[in-house]
Amino acid sequence: MYWFRNGSSLDLLPWLLAFLLAWLAGWLLASHAFKLSRNERLIAGLGLGVVLSAWLVNVVGRWLPANLAFWAAPLLLLLVGGLAAWRSPRRPLLARADLHIWPWLVAGLGFVWLFLLWSKGLALFDEHKNLSLISVIGNGEIPPLYHEPNFYLAYHYGFHLFAGGLMQLGKLLPWSAFDVAKSLAWGISLLLAVVLGRRMTGSVWGGYATAAVLALASGVRYLLTMLPPGILLRADSLIQLQGTSSSIGLPFSQALLAGWPVDGGPPLAYPFAFLNGILQPFVMAHQGPNIFSVLIFLLVWLLLPRITGRFSTVVLAAVFAMWALVWESSYALFALGLVGFAAIHYFRKRDLNLPYLRAALAALLLSAPVVLLQGGTFTEMARGMLTSLSAGSQAAGSLLSALLPHSVAAQAEAANFLGFSLRWPPAIVSSHLGALRLFSPVELVVALFELGPIVLFAPLLTAWAWRRAQAGEWILGALSVAAWAGLLIPIIFEYQTDRDISRLTSQALLIWGIMLVFAIGDRAARWRPQVRVAAIAALALACLGGLLVAGIQMTAASSTQLGDGFDKLDADLAAQVWGTLPDDARLFGPFGSSTILTGRLAGQLLDVPAEGSVWDMLEKEPSLEAIRSYSFDYVYIDSRWWGNIPAAARANANLNAGCVVTVAEVWDNSRINFRRLLDLSNCN
């Protein structure tokens, strides 16, 4: 019901082989394209293999069927790794000494298993968009469509390329593919944090501390409960809870003491006071793309200072391109930091003679055209701008058609150009608490607790990072610029979906939190002992909320949730029909679930069909004649949708006509609930 479509764990072996091939390719690249130590090569190679093989799926999946694309990607990557080894004077091909870190790999497997236990028992962020994307990409819809015909999706679907392989090669069901992919990315991220922390602090314990801060750090909203009651009562009239948090239905001061009413949560509710609307603790990062973005961020931090030449520059350009496809805000923020640091350094020194800074800029520059053409948010934004610019220009329109062959003007219009506007008054944005105005003393106090104590060390960390950058570790300077941009942009600018802009602030806090570990461990840092003690205390306070969240999630470890209200009937139907419909088949059915269970796009991804649309009309009054008149070949019916249709509409649907063929049908023991897929292609 949860794991495999065919019920056998042996079905995972093809995916496991492809995964190991990608890891081997990444190990070759880490060994011969970058100057990494023996403690770093195997784990960095694991990250490279996972990231680049998924990126190659996005490339080859446009021309190859899914079963070949998910094999071709790791094999192509292995060829690239072999080329790197052939070009490199370094011998042996792979160093046996790299394997001495096997205890770390065992620990990483433990992290994967722990997160999988949590994910299996939770259905957080299992929105239709995640499961739908994994299902259609796993079935070969690359790049994914927003809706038919040929309107591509403006979304960060890079993570779903990785998860889709688990469906196609590993025969997993959508929800298990989602959970396994998240868990693998989470475990690899912690391993990369250990490796990076060990390099930067020169200590194994520094690596462990980096991983702990990554996993647990968050804000300190819980400390608001220690303030005088009058301050919190004043906050009640100023702060309106946003999104899911508004379901608490209590004033802010009382909501702090309540549980977070989220669907699919653990048996013991998350205490709202220990959550955060800016930097969610990594132990709670169940969305998927955000985990994969952290993995790439740490990988870039490891690799950029170890570039060896043009070959590694090209490899990094591909990693950058994948980052833009996974989490465009973090890619853009890093790019801004790198270019901003280079500009500042050039203005001050009149050169760019820091080690491999030019190569890093070249990798970023190489990634830009790929980002604009590979699919996802940036591609569709570029398509929309070109569509606008080419209005009334036949020549420009021809160029648009050549570069970006399918117009998606409706989507581009919804996204518009960047979607930013000036914010007044300035505010710190929390996805739970909304915009907290800096000119309101009470809101400012709440905002500082929401940000957490790490932000108080930002000036000291900037000075420390700049000294290290001038000594050659320029990536610290670039990240420092990126962090300040991530903090200030949401304060100054408002976004069309304002809660999403908190991702920039989250990235800033993540950078400063990891940097704070490194600065504490840097004996050359000019920090007084009292400052170091205060920094350690700040990290401890920031990690307490994440530690409690992790404990709460333990209560879900023994349970299983499929997500989105799915049950055994859905799993049984998916086992029979997923990936079996013809490539040109058009499917009608309940929004979301029909796409997830069959692997074929039904309706549109992400958004519910508009009121009064054809899809909405057919959902309310389905009939054989109406469905066929819109050229749908198949219809998926479940009792949840069918039972909500008026009896008269069900009687007139005529979906039991002689020309209708039942492809698959499952019932529960009560013979009340069912799932059914019908073939209407013989009906004229």
Image (cartoon, rainbow, N blue to C red):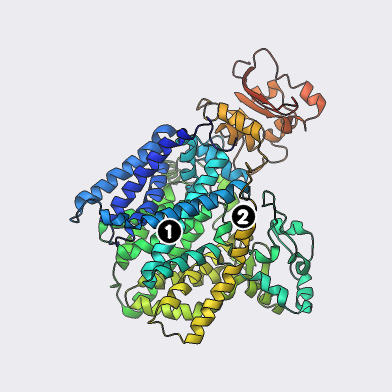
For the N terminus, the image quarter is top right
Judge depth for marks 2 and 1 and give the one in front. Answer: 2
- Name the amino acid type tagged 2: Met
- C-alpha separation, residue under disc 2 versus residue under disc 1: 21 Å
Q: Position of residue 508 (x, y in %)?
A: 51, 68
Q: Identify the secondary structure beneath mark 1.
A: helix
Could one spot residue 390 in this view of the protein?
no
Q: Which mark is residue 554?
A: 2
Observer able to see residue 359 = yes
Q: Is residue 454 left or right of residue 307?
A: right
User: Image point 34% across, 43% down: which residue?
Assistant: 21
Near mark 1 (Cα within 10 A), the count class, few <14, some 14-19 or many ≥20, is: many
- Residue 662, given in percent of the width and then of the height, sits at 63, 19
Question: In this rendering, is residue 447 above or below 287?
Answer: below
Q: Quadrant of residue 569?
A: top right
- Where is residue 124? Give x, y as percent: 63, 50
Residue for point 31% across, 51% down = 27
Q: Nearer the viewer, residue 353 or 180?
A: 180
Looking at this rendering, what residue extends furthest in the left direction? 89
Q: Nearer the viewer, residue 378 or 125?
A: 125
**Residue 74 drawn at (x, y percent):** 35, 42
- 275 is higher (above) or lower (below) than 476: above
Q: Residue furthest top?
A: 658
Q: Nearer the viewer, residue 607 or 92?
A: 92
Residue 527 in which image quadrant: bottom left
* Residue bearing the label numbered 1: 191
Query: From what the image shows, is residue 43 above or below residue 137?
Result: below
Near-viewer residue (488 or 191): 191
Residue type, label 1? Leu
Q: Quadrant location of residue 469?
A: bottom left
